[in-house]
Amino acid sequence: GAGVSQSPSNKVTEKGKDVELRCDPISGHTALYWYRQSLGQGLEFLIYFQGNSAPDKSGLPSDRFSAERTGGSVSTLTIQRTQQEDSAVYLCASSLGGAGGETQYFGPGTRLLVL
Amino acid sequence: SQQGEEDPQALSIQEGENATMNCSYKTSINNLQWYRQNSGRGLVHLILIRSNEREKHSGRLRVTLDTSKKSSSLLITASRAADTASYFCATDAGGTSYGKLTFGQGTILTVHP
């Protein structure tokens, strides 16, 4: 079946602009995750959605970052007033969730460059 | 902060040789997962091993877990040039941290034809 998809693949923006990154999880997966990969920080957890529960936002680096998941499926990660340090690859993953469903399947990522 | 620490940071071997990568972590875990990444893009899941398991196999891959030492190893047997990639371990601490993977810095594996 189809894997996790993300769009756009690449995004170049100017400092101060807002950006939206999209993630389509694997159909039927109740859990969705956002991570960020940068040269200086490696792979970092950002936010986690599980079903209809309130998301775990503990990894978001600042209040300029937010994410939503509509209808339990597609998710959008929004970065407001982008800064150069936001440049990174943003990875989305999904999993079945629950016991036995912990394996996370990753999308190809969105490479964000803030000029 | 990165809980998992991979060792070595880089590994260069010839095709046909075995490659062993190690991962150490600091806190108790629910499970540990190994991933492969090519060209800095998407992560491919390799194996998940739970805290009550000691060893798992998948094709040419063998993963061990020693919770008393808080360490895991990934063995790739009979390596191929196509195995060239970065390999990451990631821990899931469970509980209130369930699902929040903490990744190590990765091991860069180069397999020469």
Image: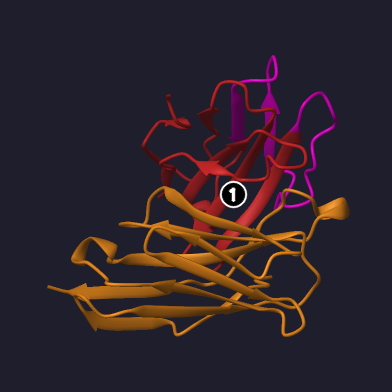
Chain colours: A red, B orange
Instruction: Give the secondary structure at mark 1.
Output: strand
Asked if the stretch drawn in magenta spans residue B104, the answer is no
Place of residue A85 in the rendered image (x, y in percent of width and height, measured from the top left): 53, 58
Which chain does tag 1 point to?
A
- At a point 77% along the width and 26% down the height, the residue shown is A51
Horizontal side of residue A78 vs A115, given as left or right: right
Residue A8 image position (x, y, % from top left): 40, 31
Q: Nearer the viewer, residue B18 or A14?
A: B18
Give B68 or A59, whichever is nearer the viewer. B68
Please report the residue visible at 39 percent of the width from the left and 58 percent of the height from the top.
B59
Span highlighted in magenta in the image: A50-79
Residue A70, magenta (yes or no): yes
Observer-nearest of A4 and A65: A4
- Residue B102 x, y percent position in the rendering: 66, 62
Q: As shown in the figure, which amino acid type bears the numbered disc 1?
A: Tyr
> Is there any visible trace of residue A92 in the rendered image?
yes
Check the image and report above or below for B94 versus A102: below
Tell me the residue that label 1 is attached to. Answer: A35
Q: Quadrant of the C terminus of chain B?
A: bottom left
